[in-house]
Image (tube, rainbow, N blue to C red):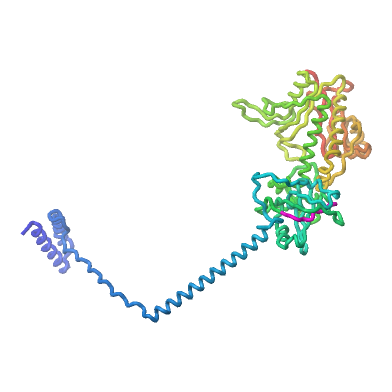
Amino acid sequence: MSEGEEIATKIAALGADIAAAKKAEKPKEEWEPILKEMLDLKAKYKEVTGNDYGPPKKEKAKKQPEQQSQGPSEKNKEKNAEKARKKAEKEAKKKAQREERERREREKRDRLAGVGQNNFGDTKLVQSHHVTDTVWTGIQDLEPSLAGQSVTIRGHVHTSRSVGKGVFVLVRSALYSVQAVCFESEEVSKDMIKYVATLPSESVVDVVGTVTVPDQPVDSATQKLVEISITKFHCVSKTCAPMPFLMEDACRPDCGKETDVGEYTGEEKASEDGLVRVGQEVRLDNRWLDLRTPANQSIFRIESMVGHLFRENLMKKGFVEIHTPKLIGGASEGGSEVFKLDYFGQEACLAMSPQLHKQMTAACSGFERVFETGPVFRAENSNTRRHLCEFTGMDLEMAIHEHYDEVLEVFSDLFIYIFDGLNERCKSELERVREQHPFEDLKYCRPTLKISYAEGCKLLREAGIDQDDYEDLSTKNEKKLGEIVREKYDTDFFFMDKYPLAVRPFYTMPCPENPKLSNSFDFFYPWSRNSLRGSAYSRT
């Protein structure tokens, strides 16, 4: 007997002893040592034989392959084939119907989009492939003298409305707009009418048509005496997303006059006439769109013209344009806080005025007459309409020969030149602003009216307003004085000099006749003072 067999015999005997003890219900403490001995023998058995002790593993019985079921009968085969054929026919019919429906929808969509048409539809992306012989006409140039002529214009779709078998569309470009119309005819299809009528507002379009003269002026357009009878209508750039507001609402006239004093709260008031208007917060959040309104377009053009006239007039008078630094080492004048910043480890600030550089060039460097148009920064933490942290300043400085009235004469001529220039060169722009923000024409004298501070205070007292000759004017009294001067002298624009020295900056020259007064002045116009302030300086 081998060693493995001997160990297996011992294990079997011990197993029998343990089974007998369990059967006799002896306590575990009596047979547990036998169990430990048996486990040790099992470990030794595996060590000797390389196998675990126990009966050999039974091999799993292999599954006998199932007998193949008998195939369907010939009768069932025919039934199944018929079902499959009918199912295939049904699926093919559904597919054909679906394809036919998609084809019709695609044709309808293409037809409404003008695909394959030469008189309407979406144009290809402009990629500068070639230059055509198209002659473009500006909307501002459309007038009755062009009646009967074919023109091509480009602009935004301002509004459109369908009427029966026709459509009216207002096309706008910058400040100007014209009404274009088309009605169903041999040349104009029903699909073209629908295409024109359903284009989203603010889409950019090219319109080809014949200029006609309507029976009644078109009140909604700037070109009131003409219409365009559309022959071709193509979309260059289609509005994809909903607009934050309608341009028609953004162009409505002001419902009431906004006060020019007090703090701006951002609160929007309901329109008195019940029409929708776009509030300032929404406008500023979507400034790119708000700037398309004719009024805003005009304001920017008027601003540009003011700068041009300012420069043109002063250069005729021998002034030199300068460009002064806007990053400087310290405040250039008192009375206002500055925006401070770090300049490579040194403290610097944004220029609050070109004052020092103007004086340097005009008085000290021999230029004698200089001017500048540039940004001005004031760190004034105020929310009133009379304070700005940043604005464009139009400054001039000049040396005088004998009296600072020489400066007032220059200013008088300058402003009259600007006012006349705007009235002559910006007629359309002024009207576009007036349509949305009604205003009266500015009244001004030639030469500009000049009164002393004492005379202004006297006018206020004569109107029953308490105003001392040496007391600074309040905002309320400034406005009242403007009303009095307009009524008495028929002018909105005037200047007042000989201000009390106590209410002017430290560098202001005292008046030689009265040391309590100063050689200084302010210009007044409706809405504000302080747009232009000046003085002669004390020599230091």
- Give residue 331's quadrant in the image: top right
- Residue 255 makes an appearance in the image: no
* Quadrant in which the N terminus appears: bottom left
Looking at the rendered image, the quarter that the C terminus falls into is: top right
Q: Quadrant of residue 111?
A: bottom right
In the image shown, does 9 or 237 lie closer to the viewer? Answer: 237
Check if residue 232 falls in the magenta segment.
Answer: yes
Q: Tell me which residue sits at (56%, 66%) in the image.
A: 99
Question: In this orientation, which residue lies closer to the viewer: 89 or 361?
Answer: 89
- Residue 3 is left or right of residue 360, and the answer is left
Indicate whether residue 310 is drawn in magenta.
Answer: no
Name above or below for residue 486 compared with residue 50: above
Percent across and percent down for residue 421 are 85, 36
Q: Report whether residue 313 is seen.
A: yes
Task: Name the residue at the front extreme.
Answer: 133
Start and end of the magenta stretch?
224-233
